Amino acid sequence: MNAQALRFVPPGTLPRNGTVKGACPHDCPDTCALHITVENGVAVKVGGDPDHPPTHGALCTKVARYPERTYHAQRLLQPMRRVGRKGQGRFEPISWDEALATIASRLQAIARVDPQAILPYSYAGTMGYVQGEGMAGRFFNRLGASRLDRTICAAAGGAGLIHTLGAKVGMDVEAFEQSRLILIWGSNSITSNLHFWTFAQRAKRQGARLIAIDPLRTDTAEKCHQHIALRPGSDAALALAMAHVLIREDLLDHDYIAQHTLGFEALAARAAQYPPERAAALCGIDAQVIIELAREYGRTRPAAIRLNYGVQRTHGGANAVRAVACLPALVGAWREPAGGLLLSSSAMMPERADLERPELAPAGERRVVNMSTIGDALTQDDRLRALVVYNSNPVAVAPESEKVIAGFAREDLFTVVIEHFQTDTADFADILLPATTQLEHFDLHKTYGHWYLMANEPAIAPLGQARSNSEIFRQLASAMGFTEPALQASDEALAREAIDWSHPRLAGESLESVRAAGWVRLKIASAPFAQGGFPTPSGRCEFHSDRLAALGLDPLPDYLPPYEAPTAQYPLSCLSPPGRNFMNSTFVNIESLRGRDPEPACMLHPQDAAERGISDGQMLRVFNERGAFEARAQVSDRARPGVVAAWGVWWHKLAPGGRNVNAVTSQKLTDLGAGPTFYDCHVQVEPVLALQVGAQVPDLGK
């Protein structure tokens, strides 16, 4: 059935039969436009909108199964109260009135002594303005709770962009179709950015060269013309060596550099320290590969870089992003729509900064807790007395799991979890509240991988007693006795207040027009930085950052070695890239998807496997001083020697041995942005000779 033949339901209408326009809520740059088919009040199909250019009618295998997730037999559909020890996952049902009264009473008692003993913990379980931080942010501001530094995914990369390009800005993903050279840097696009890959494939069919830069020969790298398998954490050295060659061989756009950049001479001096031979030793590749890559990049127009967050999960991650982000300005790639760089374009959206109403907060400084070090925060800081977790599963996704689990197991920590399923984190809740899914509530979405504003309409009534995040926080505000009108704003009001509708990029648009169409494209020039105009203080691409210098930091990008180097005890670098059939820890419990990935896997090179007596398909124990997990061996030369890759992120309780890869990751933080260093991790691997798949796993509460 084509789009014209569908019977679309007007916004705000719950159909018995018809098609509803929606948007994918998950942490993915694609932010697909959805068509949700409803029959007799039941959502029977979720498909892609064929008229939305980035989606072009296709969905990933995960979101195409959204009805299975929504109607899952293990869906949480009523409030619950813990009756066992924390971590055992034993609960009894209670009413909403009792749940809200209990939460309000406990939070009020804590807040009377110290409101900053309360901490919200959330991330991108939904990325919508309404069901994300809109009403939740208002509630916690009014409460005066500690603030959460939401760093766990993109903080280092964002900081790198901000100190180079001025904000999270980048080229139009649709323009990659016209590129002649595409560097896919730190991205397995087939897994984590499927619709960009479609544009890259179109470019390839028109003669473009695709080069993957990644320690692993991923599914994406397999389909590129060239794969450069550098060492984890060495990306900045490669980028600076490319700059060295570009400058040495005068493959530069001197006019663009003079008119639209800041600090070229200083960058040239820094790049002079990274001749290809030095960088080759750091990256573990041939110097000639670097030279030829730089020449090809400097001589091809238009040339584009799809940079992704894999590069920024080591000690020097932000500097790596800074170094790569300098390259397009050196060669003037920004002059053309199909040239430049895309990591995130979220700052292209004209959003308002006051959606969460910071004026509701009490006067004075509020402390900030970094979500990536929640293990240390909970085990070393007795001040924290309450957690409210929503849109996240920290017990599974935060680094250094043993500390995280120990912290959540504290009996003196009052924990509320708002969830769809009984996740690892939900097992530690004192009160567990059932949330609606994307098919059951309204939301408005910005994107970070394309230039569209998206609306999501509810397609079905909430199942059981599930309530939306926004409604839960409105009701909690009432139960706490908060009377400010902003804490009772409707979902529609939140959506209106999220966006600067007067901005030229939304000229002629309104909330009504977005909801009617399902999406609108921002009005942005096809080559937005052809004449400079970067959102930096200087208006230029800043090779040299005066803001960093003012903070006493290196104003130029540089290579910072990983925290962890190979040792005799832990010789293997461990990466934990996303699994193709999961979205972080979301979808891990969906049987049809786990049928494709029935258990955790760990890829290692044949040489590393042979040295340890490991055969393909054997169970492994992967360990270091922080912990251990088990996984099925994938022996393949797609991993470079000295590197193992454990696809994430499994729930602990669904993994053999009861732990996932975050048992071995570290709480150390990146150079800028205070982000996590998931890929800055060294381990040892050994065979497990007698583990039966499906064996009983340890109780997380022990």
Image (cartoon, helix red, strand yellow):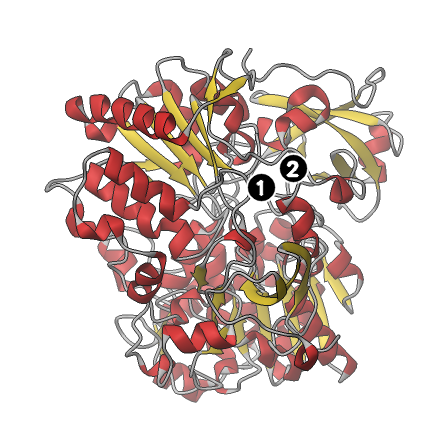
- Badge 2 marks a residue whose secondary structure is strand
Vertical relation: 13 (above or below) 283: below
What label does residue 679 carry, if any?
A: 1
Find disc 2 in the rendering and name its residue. Answer: 573
Q: Residues within 10 Å of mark 2 (few under 14, many from 20)?
A: many
First reached walking from the N terminus: tag 2 or tag 1: 2
* Camera sees residue 477: yes
Query: Would you say residue 241 is visible in this rendering?
Result: no
Q: Amino acid at mark 1?
A: Tyr
Q: Quadrant of residue 166?
A: bottom left
Image quarter of residue 55: bottom right
Q: Are marks 2 and 1 in contact (CB under 8 Å)?
A: yes
Residue 576 or residue 570, whichever sits in front? 576
Residue 217: percent from left, percent from top: 76, 53
Which quadrant of the view contains residue 625? Answer: top right
Residue located at (42% from left, 34% from top) = 389
Q: Residue at x 62, y 78 (%)?
A: 176
Q: How many marks?
A: 2
Give me the C-alpha separation between circle 2 and circle 1: 8 Å
Secondary structure under badge 1?
Answer: loop
Which part of the image, by quadrant, shows the N terminus?
bottom right
Query: From the viewer's perspective, is 637 left or right of 212?
Result: right
Q: Which mark is residue 68?
A: none
Instruction: Name the residue at 63% across, 79% down.
Output: 51
Q: Position of residue 351 (x, y in %)?
A: 33, 67
Q: Does residue 160 lie above or below 117 as drawn?
A: below
Quadrant that contains the C terminus: top right
User: Is 149 left or right of 190, judged from the image as shown?
Assistant: left
Residue at (13% x, 41% y) in the render? 362
